[in-house]
Image (tube, rainbow, N blue to C red):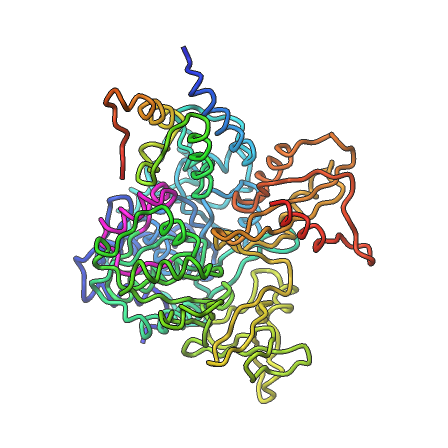
Amino acid sequence: MPYILQQLLTESVRQFPDKPAVWARGRTLTYRELEQRSNQVAHLLRSRGVEKGDRIGIYFPKAVESLAAMFGVLKAGGVYVPLDPLAPADRIAYIISNCAMKGLITNGDRLRGLDASKIPSVEFSLLTEDKANGLDRPDVVSWSELSAFPADHAPSLQATTTDLAYILYTSGSTGRPKGVMLSHQNALTFIEWCAETFSVRSDDHVSNHAPLHFDLSVFDVYNAIKAGATVYMVPDDTAKFPASLSKWMVEQEISIWYSVPSALVFLLLHGNMKAEKLARLRIILFAGEVFPQKYLKQLAELLPHIELHNLYGPTETNVCTYYTVDRERLKTQDKLPIGKACTNTEVFAVDDNDHIVTQPGEVGELYVRGPSVTNGYWADPEKTAKMCVPNRFQPHFQEKMYKTGDLVMLDEYGDYLFLGRRDNQIKSRGYRIELGEIEAALLSHSGVREAAAIAIPDEEIGARIKAVVALHQPGSLSVVDLQQHCAARIPNYMIPEMIELRDTLPKTSTGKVDRVSLAQASVAVV
Amino acid sequence: MESNLKSQIREFVMENARGKGITELSDADSLISRGIVDSLGIFRLVSFLEESFGVRIPDDEIINDNFQTIDDIDRFVTAKLGAVKGQAPATA
């Protein structure tokens, strides 16, 4: 049984050395090539002083080198940190310093961007290409230098399944992203469950639609590698055009598709998808947000022979529950369940009286325990203590459980239904967004006196973001000024698409900003 | 001479770009890799083109070849307006 992620690759290399492991933008790496390249990356990292547990950023648009980088870092004993190639420099700078990143695997374009923004530099940067103008300096290493390192074996490593494998940064309510620490065991628990439930096979073509800093990609990459299948990374530009995307799915003969529901809704509405053309497609998985029932019914009808599964789980738990769509029940269902716990995971809902919910119709907050659950947030014991709490329902030994903040209800079949959040976290296009992080970005402008971010429900993408802002001096800033200020601090998908300027924000009787009335007024207008 | 069509397209794209913190953009810059057009924004752009220039853009023409840059969009819409003269736009 593999206990660290890189063993999945090494196992598959033995069986399928000449099969393509990864496809990206028309290029492929076979299993042997991926094994050898990642061995060389690992040796190069060691030669640069990387030791067990050191954090290495992966910061370039998806390419076959992405997998060589991920496995290379793991084989060196490091912890990889995927960074959004489109994130503003300020956010990248925060992550680099928050996790004390030792090195980066990046490209010339991104590195020049970091240099221009005067971001505190890491000790070294490995480029996925050769050094070009302005980057000819000792801390920058060309990809071609890898050939000087051994390809046939990885560096020796003493590792256990509880070592960290990667850190995924997700939106934080106090204005800064937080780094969810995932161990080899956390990921493998999920991968083992997937293998058993979806029977991923060596002839599968597994899509990779989600960005690598988004936890859906963990399924795509490691399940494909475990099965000896091929992972097909969706080109970024193709992903933006539904007709191009469905054509790509046909051409690449995708057999397992995994994405957020909003990507599937776009495909459904504008992709001209045809069941007879998607001959090899057998499984569609979706996660990250609620699938609008109306569109799910249309998808189930359009693709009548394809299994549809709803996976649920915050990044902190990988995936903790799932529900397989039952086409008969779907006809009369108003809400799609998030289902029951995955193998080797326990979930339960706790009501306001601190009792575990057992009867249909009862509501509680969902808790998760088991080996897929994170140990917490990097360098943030306070947030960790708030979310990863002692299991008070089991007195015999100490263990932690994760408090999701999600309100659920048990239904008559024993499935959980997602009702909403306890706090101000929202989902838009599957991205997890803390409204507080948007407010903090707005408030960091010296001209802003008050700011409230609100989510306006949207059928296709889950929610659109609006902000209501009061300035110190009315008229001193425009909507575009504020959007640009946000763009330098938070990712594109978090920037409010609408900003309303007011003289003052409405307050509740306790003096807090009255989000409820703001949200109600906004929904009424839209 | 610069066409009125292209300047209207540029103005619409720049309005969206500014909201994402981008103030400089050439007509040949990729709207996707600069993060200006995402999967939602593309349909707003399509509605704008349909309403402003009286063209109908079916889903299979909403592809990278036609929407990668301001130059591409200009070429695409110009071709559609002149479609009677036999210039057919690219499709998926």
x, y percentage for residue A157? Answer: 37, 66
Q: Is residue A494 left or right of residue A281?
A: right
Q: Is residue A406 above or below residue A344?
A: above
Residue located 36% across and 26% down the image: B77
Q: Is residue A255 left or right of residue A337?
A: left
Query: Which quarter of the figure has residue A227?
Result: bottom left
x, y percentage for residue A33? Answer: 23, 54
Query: Which quarter of the figure has residue A402?
Result: bottom right
- Of residues A343 and A249, the one drawn nearer to the viewer in this rendering: A249
- Of residues A507 and A296, the one drawn nearer to the viewer in this rendering: A296
Residue located 50% across and 43% down the image: A87
Which region is colored magenta? A233-258
x, y percentage for residue A60? Answer: 40, 44
Residue located 43% across and 63% down the image: A165
x, y percentage for residue A45? Answer: 39, 52
Residue located 60% across and 37% down the image: A483
Q: Residue A242 lies in magenta, yes or no?
A: yes
Residue placed furthest toward the left: A18
